[in-house]
Image (cartoon, rainbow, N blue to C red):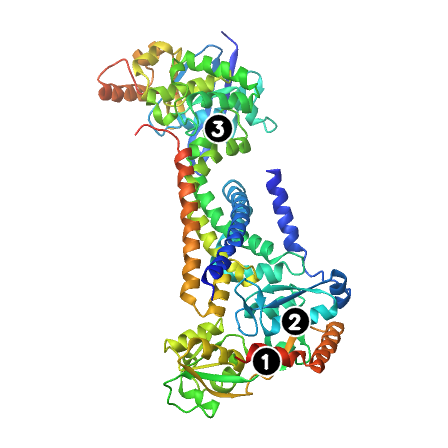
């Protein structure tokens, strides 16, 4: 058995893991942000609807949702497992990201909105120029957690046939009968990905922090 | 000095059964400084918010110059550009420097060119004596400095009138009597009496006004100042 | 904001367009595309596994590649967990699956099968030191048993031992993959592993310290390629080529290559 080659095979799965994450996280952010805005700033019906969405999505195990979205909902559209898996994971993540953004919006004081309206800004101008820039700063730390979760959850798309890190480790484990080596390699790669992501986001947060006297 | 700039007619605000103020009538002429005083919880802040439409009154009208701004077809975003407001806790935009706080309304609401807007914003900061703090964030300014930035932010919009909510927490209360043309005493949601500072402070007509001033005197130890809001 | 709305619209449309299966002939479509998408679960050596350069290979894989060649198309392999394969065929995500699958009445309700391309047997594997009696497979009722979930072995144990109440539910462990069953056998968490005979033999050789105590046709038997329900043209084409390969001795040669040391 050529260990180096097998490890390389597992490591190549990083491309898929990173790819899935890079599609799922931003699409989840866009959807989640939109739902959060609707939830906080719109009428009762929309508020109820978005809350229901969030509760349902978060109440179902991601793997179950992934199967539903992939096999049933995406039915006969010609989407590759990679894209279907990534978008499905993005939809799953959108509910969690909605809660993160919603919490951040609510923790920006209501006075900020009032002050913006008082100088003649419309609601949407106030959201864009005053509420949002503050919201995003507040959202970075919890979002960093969600990014780590999505990186780890990206392993779920193996169930749809995307040859990412975990699936490759399973295949190598099956063909070499060396499960420890295969899974240790996978664990190491996941750890590095999560560690680097969190460090980058920490740095971003420090960079964007609003200066204030202690 | 006789053109009414702001006219309030029969203004009433309720939250459910709880009447905040009712049947308020008030006329403000161009150049006037009106100070509204009264016990806390008497509806002063809510009255101000009803004037610039941050809160909608239930009954009555507000006229700015000869336009009824409480009318249904009136664009409240446009109205607020003409009514400057300085909040009790200033409410500066926390993520922006003092300069950007003043700039935001000029570029986004008045759609001024960035260079022109910057010149004007700096001039407004200069007016409140804070041009050397232009690059500071609200968190780096003292309470008084924040209030002055908030004033500059409101003045930059060239408003017809300015509203100050509880400005005395950072201003010397003794000054109020000197700068105001008229004092309005508001209690339990209605205007009890109004007059010049001299009339109201030294010759109050109503028992309730006297009681209020007496309590304030006890609190501050001086006869000629009251807890002044507006 | 406009872009956000657009995205939501696109997503909604994506979710809304369901059930527009092509009515054109599947076989003709495959030949036109020059590409046959075949699913397998490449964790079942020697039938299907990943070789040291990361290629999918094995008995089933090499056979399918030859079938593809004779259909005049290239085979594109999609790896997914065993449990997902049937659903993927049903949903048209893959054209067919070859994954050491047997004909099964339950499966026949939702998909179709080719003729058998090979006949496999079941095996019962235990540790070297095992002293019990498994000459009759029904004796598994006295032990803790493991099998790969969704396989015919899983079905056989469920139907013959668990449902009649001979084997308590908590004494039957289902695993996602066969190597996990072997690992738990090695660890002593189960007493008997039931699987296809050929991979069982391969596992005994690789792990060591295990033996096959029984082999014969119980749950398994003929192996078939699984195709979409009612896909008669594709079925006929596969059956024709399988017959051809059997006649030429190609399949027997493959069996020797993969199933003997």
Q: Nearer the viewer, mark 1 or mark 2?
A: 1
Q: What element does badge 1 sit on?
A: helix
Residue located beneath label 3 in the image? A116
Chain letter of the residue beneath label 3 in the structure image: A
Q: CA distance from mark 3 to mark 2?
A: 67 Å
Chain letter of the residue beneath label 1 in the structure image: C
Q: What element does badge 2 sit on?
A: helix
Q: Residue furthest top?
A: B1
Give the residue displayed 49% in from the left and 75% down from the top.
C148
> Quick check: A142 above or below B209?
below
Which residue occupies the foreground of this view, C66 or A94?
C66
Mark 1: few/some/many CA within 10 Å (<14, 14-19, 20+)? few
User: As drawn, is B211 to the left or to the right of A107?
Assistant: left
Residue B196 in view of the camera: no
Chain letter of the residue beneath label 2 in the structure image: C
Mark identifier at residue B194: none
| Figure quadrant of the C terminus of chain B | top left
Mark 3: few/some/many CA within 10 Å (<14, 14-19, 20+)? many
Q: Nearer the viewer, mark 3 or mark 2?
A: 2
> Quick check: C55 above or below C261?
above
First in sequence: mark 1 vs mark 2: 2
Mark 2: few/some/many CA within 10 Å (<14, 14-19, 20+)? many
Pointers 3 and 2 within a single chain: no
Q: CA distance from mark 1 to mark 3?
A: 79 Å
Mark identifier at residue C64: 2
User: As drawn, is A67 to the left or to the right of B130?
Assistant: right
Q: Position of residue C67 (x, y in %)?
A: 69, 72
Contact (Cβ within 8 Å) of mark 1 with mark 3: no
Q: Position of residue B73 (x, y in %)?
A: 61, 28
Give the residue displayed 46% in from the left and 15% down from the top.
B122
Residue located beneath label 1 in the image? C256
């Amino acid at each position: 058995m050529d260990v180096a080659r097998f490890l390389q095979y597992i490591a190549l799965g990083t491309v898929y893991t990173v790819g899935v994450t890079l599609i799922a996280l931003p699409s989840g952010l866009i959807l989640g942000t939109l739902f959060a805005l609707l939830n906080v700033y719109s009428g009762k019906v929309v508020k109820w609807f978005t809350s229901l969405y969030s509760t349902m999505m978060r109440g179902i195990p991601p793997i179950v949702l992934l199967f539903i979205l992939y096999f049933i909902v995406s039915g006969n559209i010609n989407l590759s497992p990679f894209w279907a898996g990534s978008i499905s994971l993005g939809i799953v993540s959108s509910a969690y990201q909605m809660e993160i953004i919603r919490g951040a919006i609510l923790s920006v004081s209501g006075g900020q909105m009032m002050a913006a309206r008082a100088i003649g800004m419309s609601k949407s101008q106030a959201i864009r120029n005053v509420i949002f820039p503050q919201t995003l700063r507040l959202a970075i730390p919890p979002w960093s957690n969600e990014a780590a979760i999505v990186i780890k959850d990206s392993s779920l798309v193996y169930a749809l046939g995307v040859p990412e890190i975990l699936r490759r480790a399973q295949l190598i484990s099956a063909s070499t009968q060396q499960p420890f080596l295969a899974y240790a390699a996978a664990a190491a790669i996941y750890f590095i990905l999560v560690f680097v992501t969190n460090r980058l986001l920490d740095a971003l947060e420090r960079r964007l922090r609003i200066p204030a006297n202690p | 000095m006789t053109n009414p700039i702001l006219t309030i007619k029969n203004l009433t605000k309720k939250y459910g059964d709880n009447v905040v103020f009712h049947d308020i009538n008030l006329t403000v002429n161009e150049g006037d400084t009106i100070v509204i005083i009264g016990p806390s919880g008497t509806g002063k802040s809510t009255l101000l918010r009803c004037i610039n439409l941050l809160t909608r009154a239930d009954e009555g009208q507000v006229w700015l110059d000869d336009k009824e701004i409480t009318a249904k077809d009136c664009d409240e975003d446009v109205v607020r550009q003409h009514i400057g407001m300085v909040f009790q806790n200033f409410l500066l935009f926390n993520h922006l420097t003092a300069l950007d706080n003043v700039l935001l309304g000029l570029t986004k609401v008045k759609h001024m060119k960035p260079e022109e807007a910057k010149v004007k914003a700096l001039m407004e900061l200069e007016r409140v004596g804070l041009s050397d703090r232009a690059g500071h964030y609200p968190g780096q300014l003292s309470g008084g400095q924040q209030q002055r930035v908030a004033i500059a932010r409101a003045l930059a919009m060239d408003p017809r009138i300015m509203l100050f909510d509880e400005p005395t927490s950072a201003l010397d209360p003794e000054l109020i009597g000197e700068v105001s043309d008229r004092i309005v005493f508001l209690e339990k949601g209605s205007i009890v009496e109004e007059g010049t500072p001299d009339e109201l402070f030294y010759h109050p007509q109503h028992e309730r006004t006297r009681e209020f001033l007496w309590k304030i005197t006890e609190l501050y130890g001086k006869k000629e100042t009251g807890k002044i809001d507006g | 904001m406009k872009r956000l709305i657009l995205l939501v619209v696109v997503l909604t449309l994506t979710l809304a367009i369901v059930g527009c299966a092509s009515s054109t002939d599947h076989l003709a479509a495959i030949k036109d595309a020059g590409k046959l998408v075949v699913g397998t679960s490449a964790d079942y050596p020697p039938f299907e596994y990943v070789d040291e350069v990361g290629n999918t290979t094995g008995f089933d894989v090499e056979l399918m590649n030859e079938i593809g060649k004779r259909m005049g198309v290239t085979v594109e392999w999609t790896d997914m967990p065993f449990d997902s394969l049937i659903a993927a065929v049903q949903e048209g995500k893959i054209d067919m699956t070859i994954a050491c699958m047997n004909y099964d009445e339950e499966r026949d309700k939702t998909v179709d099968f080719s003729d058998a391309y090979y006949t496999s047997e079941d095996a019962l594997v235990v540790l070297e030191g095992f002293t019990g009696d498994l000459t009759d497979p029904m004796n598994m009722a006295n032990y803790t048993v493991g099998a790969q979930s969704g396989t015919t072995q899983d079905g056989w144990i469920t139907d013959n031992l668990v449902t009649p109440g001979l084997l308590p539910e908590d004494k039957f462990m289902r695993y996602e993959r066969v190597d996990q069953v072997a690992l738990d056998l090695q660890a002593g968490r189960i007493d008997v592993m039931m699987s296809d005979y050929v991979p069982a033999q391969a596992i005994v050789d690789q792990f060591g310290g295990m033996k096959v105590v029984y082999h014969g046709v119980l749950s398994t038997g003929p192996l078939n390629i699984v195709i979409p329900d009612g896909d008669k043209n594709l079925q006929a084409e596969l059956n024709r080529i399988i017959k051809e390969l059997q006649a030429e001795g190609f399949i027997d040669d493959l069996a020797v290559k993969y199933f003997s040391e």
